[in-house]
Amino acid sequence: MAVGPGTLPEFFPVAGVKLGIASAGIKKPGRKDVVVFELVPGSRVAGIFTRNQFCAAPVTLSRQHLAKKSPRYLLINTGNANAGTGERGMTDAIACCEALAEKAGVSPEEVLPFSTGVIGEPLPVGKIVGALAGALASTSEQDWVEAAKGIMTTDTRPKGASRQVDLDGDMVTISGISKGAGMIRPNMATMLGFIATDARIEPGLLQTLASELGETSFNRITIDGDTSTNDSCMLMASGQYRGPEITADSPALPKLRAALEEVYLELAHAIVRDGEGATKFVTIEVSGAATQQEALDVAYTVAHSPLVKTALFASDPNWGRILAAVGRAGVPELDLNALEIFLGDVCLVRDGGRADDYSEARGQAVMDQEEITIAIDLKRGEIKETVWTCDFSHDYVTINAEYRT
Amino acid sequence: MAVGPGTLPEFFPVAGVKLGIASAGIKKPGRKDVVVFELVPGSRVAGIFTRNQFCAAPVTLSRQHLAKKSPRYLLINTGNANAGTGERGMTDAIACCEALAEKAGVSPEEVLPFSTGVIGEPLPVGKIVGALAGALASTSEQDWVEAAKGIMTTDTRPKGASRQVDLDGDMVTISGISKGAGMIRPNMATMLGFIATDARIEPGLLQTLASELGETSFNRITIDGDTSTNDSCMLMASGQYRGPEITADSPALPKLRAALEEVYLELAHAIVRDGEGATKFVTIEVSGAATQQEALDVAYTVAHSPLVKTALFASDPNWGRILAAVGRAGVPELDLNALEIFLGDVCLVRDGGRADDYSEARGQAVMDQEEITIAIDLKRGEIKETVWTCDFSHDYVTINAEYRT
């Protein structure tokens, strides 16, 4: 199951960013399971990584390499996460980077590795290394669709987003791909996002954009509250765009940032729409909070409540479950008589109980839709936060209970 | 579904504690849905209540009454939770207490009200008041089985526990009943526990026992992480036992405490065994923690992980999901190479990865059992905490998605 049409957009090629795809036969013979990003010299890369303490070896190594050099290559494999593999995991990840570096004539620190797939099994280094020559030989600026397919694991559809925006009279390009269908799949793990632009962006600003845009998109989606060991989201800037370098003071920054944000959100939302067993795309907006933390606490408590999620699956306007989730979110001295809860444009809760003008028919009309917004106004401050999630269906249980059988 | 045989024990009557049951026809005509506990004068009562800020009117009122007087009556109705009912909820709860007080010749503050059932609908005060005369007329010390059935909502089985223990040469009695099948069911809500003993217990100690025993039993079980608006667990001491008053210094206290603890645990575990859709009874032990908070954070993160719970349903020894849940529990500076994870007596994780002597066959043998222990040793301190939960099955989704249809 998945929500919405899920067709890939037309990808605009990003000057200075080439993609190579190859088949290493990691899990299935013939499956294209290795993707290489090749970045023109002078490119800059920033990113964010999983906060799970059991982070996989490639995450640790990517962090180290990123701190040392400007990357020239990103090497992604599916079929094996190289997580829970102890010291051998690091040795294997390094071996892959060294092999690619040697073939490409760069240093190993200029390669960032990413892995997704089975946890706890040794990375098949030989297979991956064997596929590198083919991947490098095939690189082109055109292969975004193949790359989007190449990083899939149990995703039911490839995910991509692309924009061109007029900046100082020239068109700047942003293209990106992502993967993930549960926040975690320890046997077929990981959310990954790769976004590239030909803009030249000052390195500090690039990391700020990668952090801020990742925070309000990929870090605001949740399928089941579980966090992968391998999550990574990288922002690449090739600098091939002819305009001036973008800095924090550039007049063009707001326009570029807005276009980047659209791409980040579209890629992040695509993961929720393809959530395991998802039949609904749900936006949870918490406003009127005194702090960001309490806004997020309320939003995630509602988003993770199995009772709210099963009610969404049933298209059941079960407002008591939303109210109870808000009540247990741990917000100190919450004024229960002040807050308001809306389902779409229908007020569910007001004055500490069901809104006077609420009717089951009005709630049902909203719940019957495929895209639903739950809006909670805490009426105690000015902070607003939004998270996105999906419902909890029989298919979620089927997918996750029968995953290894 | 439910785990284990689930037969009620033989109940020992508790001197000074009478039970009355009647039918008010709140949700179904003829259903026995009102239960009254009648306590002999001089009885003492202590309890713990839900931490959900949207607590129901009867919870607020019970707290107020308990602070003013020693209760003589507990009045419990099923079929309506009187939660999310605003100011009218309080008026209705007070009206029920006043009606019972008048009929019994006590003050309204000597009555504690408890409600469970649909959220957000007005309490049918007339129906409840109409059933009180019958309930009072039928009180006896024998009716524990009927009372256990009378407080059920969607429970598939009544829940009870009973002990007699030799204290200073005389037998002291403890009997209790509980209800609940999800931590919350906003339309048929609530965990309730009522435990009575004929021991005379010093009031401060009684509250300490109610708090401590409730904390390590009812407050350590979780079906789905949702917290009801109506949860309450009351400890009643009639004082009819002939021995001396039990104080914090009594030599008899450890023996009494141990027997009370057995009853608390048995009643709490019975709720997990009857968890919505449960096919497994799961004990999660976290040891070697530096603080109680981090032990509980790890235990609940594992207990609430939908991926761990669906793997348990599938009898799948999917250790990567447990490891990933531990890794996202937020324990600062956790040494991933030191910790150990056991499934029953089989070591899953050691030295940062799958244990060398682990085999799928050994893990499967544990997973195939109906009662499973997951033990996590953080190897950083001396603190140990245990929580109990169940698996996450298709029936959970069915029960909660189709609840109102």
Image: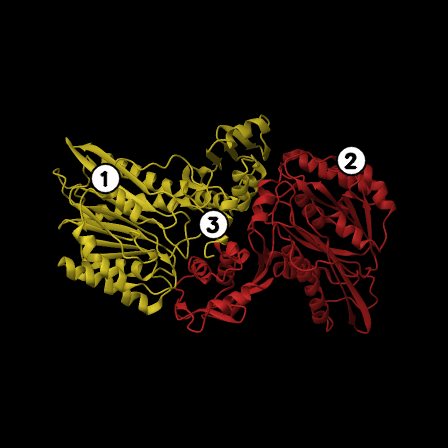
Chain colours: A red, B yellow
The residue located at (39%, 68%) in the rendering is A352
Q: Position of residue A278 (x, y in %)?
A: 61, 54
Locate residue B55: give its quadrant.
Answer: bottom left
Left of B194 or right of it: where is A300?
right
User: Would you name the residue on which mark 1 appears?
Assistant: B174
Left of A16 or right of it: where is A160?
left
Locate residue B13: give its quadrant.
Answer: top left
- In the rendered view, tell whether residue A23 sits above or below residue A159: above
Q: Secondary structure at mark 1?
A: strand
- In the rendered view, tell whether residue A203 sits above or below residue B20: below
Q: Amino acid at mark 2?
A: Lys
In 3D space, how far apart are the residues under numbered discs 1 and 3 (Cα atoms)?
Answer: 34 Å
Q: Amino acid at mark 3?
A: Ile
Are discs 2 and 3 both within one chain?
no
Query: Do residues under tags 1 and 3 come within 8 Å of each other at their CB atoms?
Result: no
**Which dot, 2 or 3, sits closer to the camera?**
3
User: Would you name the residue on which mark 3 appears?
Assistant: B399
| Sequence-wise first label, 1 or 3 | 1
Can you name the residue that lies furthest to the right here? A137
